[in-house]
Image (tube, helix red, strand yellow):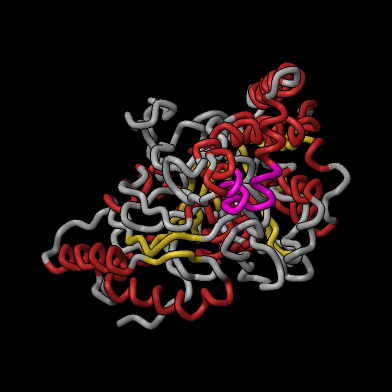
Amino acid sequence: MMPNKKKWTVGEIRAALTAKKISAHELAHEHFARIERENPKLNAFLALCPERAYAQADKIDAMVARGAELPPLAGVPVAIKDVISTRGVTTTCGSKILEHYVPPYDATAVVRLEAAGAVVLGKTNCDEFAMGSSNENSAYGPVRNPVAPDRVPGGSSGGSAAAVAAGLAAAALGTDTGGSIRQPGALCGIPAMMPTYGRVSRYGLIALASSLDRIGPFTNTVRDAATIMGLIAGRDTRDSTSASHDVPDYMASLDAPVAGLRVGIPREYFGPGMDPAVRHNIEAGIGALEKLGCKTIELNMPHTEYAIAVYYILLTAEASSNLARYDGVRYGLREAGGGTLMGMYRATRGHGFGAEVKRRIILGTYVLSAGYYDAYYRKGQQVRALVTQDFREAFERVDAIVTPTSPVPAFKLGERTDDPLAMYLADIYTVTGSLAGVPGISVPCGKTPDGLPVGLQVFGPHFGESRVLQIANAFEKVSAESGLPN
């Protein structure tokens, strides 16, 4: 048996299995042992499914034994964010209102991962119904950043990010509504990708905001992100919002030179409020891209300043509608409430939802209410179109856009819980791409003097994942070779 490695890549796992240096069963056992040891400190996993994992691992080992060609993710231990449905495995959305909910089906993304040979280990902690930027809103306690356990891992997919960063899984799925993949990827120091809206099926994703939610991967390398994206992307007849666009071979252009590519640097993303160490690292990262031959072009994206306000109008409106189904009647928690229907509603939702979810439901209900719909929701949709126009016009001039992922590195647990506005502003560089529907990735860009990871964000045009991954891969390689500020 090969000695334990803290982190595995997809390629390393495939090579080790093929050479029979380790079995898929042993690899799964290794990760479960690490979870048992580390999860009490990190709180990254909420539920494990060892029977399912070992059954899949044994299928892979049988393929190895008979010399069959292995699928792309053969034996790769993966984790799934707890807002993504998994058949027979508790899926709580980090909420008490779904504490005992067990879906009768798998999300399409999970089906596609397992069809490619992945071994699902369990479900990862997250902000309740994916509402948060720090993973402190989970009803089951906060996740801790494995790089600095006194700090947040980012949210809402903090459990998935922490699991991969700590070596508890080789890859994980998260969801991104306004930055919930990219921001925790940045704060935990790993690649994290948000695809174009519609590129990956949302079937089986428990909705927060249906026009914004997307499923994407956390991995240890950009190459692994490209591999997983190629497997989970594509049309799904069970999701009417999934796109019919052909999925290209992301690996085909991954190692292509980036010399000559035009990279846009929007001035609006470098204003007040950015941590000086983050700015220093991002500027060094842009310099590294220039040394690779990229041509940097300054951009003006004038509607960026409205993005946070627009996002929190549209997000809360959609959340208010989507969460109306948790009423104690159809499924999930049900409290008695004194024997009346209204009492049952109040008791169920009052006990089942946490403070942040209640806050957003109230905001969303308000902006949709009579007399305020036109002033807030309709106006928000109009400004969203302007933000999208900024991106469309930018991509007429450049091949990609590069920005910081987060204005600050990981902040301390509890530091922003009493200041919702400060918490919301953590998404200031990510919500723009969410509103526009474009793909983006966060890739590690050195560390602050305190050793906290910094993330560089790369945006591409709609369905431009290949270009985003190509630039991120080139950046990752040059960062490994020459190093960035630490």
Residue occupying the point 42% across, 30% down: 242
Q: Which corner quadrant of the image does residue 440 belong to?
A: top right
* 177, 266: nearer the viewer: 177
Task: Pinpoint residue 292: horizontal percent, then vertical percent.
Answer: 63, 47
- Extreme-left residue of the structure: 66
**Which corner quadrant holds the N terminus?**
bottom left
- Specify the segment rendered in magenta: 346-359
Q: Is residue 377 magenta?
A: no
Residue occupying the point 18% across, 66% down: 64
Task: Pinpoint residue 327: horizontal percent, then vertical percent.
Answer: 51, 41
Task: Pinpoint residue 204: horizontal percent, then vertical percent.
Answer: 40, 42
Q: Which corner quadrant of the image does residue 54 belong to?
A: bottom left
Above-or-below relation of 367 to 168: above
Q: Which corner quadrant of the image does residue 199 belong to?
A: top left
Residue occupying the point 75% across, 21% down: 372
Main secondary structure along the magenta-highlighted residues: helix
Q: How many marks?
A: 0
Can you see residue 364? yes
* 22, 173: nearer the viewer: 173
* 417, 170: nearer the viewer: 417
**Which corner quadrant holds the C terminus?**
bottom right
Above-or-below relation of 259 to 132: above
Can you see residue 475? no
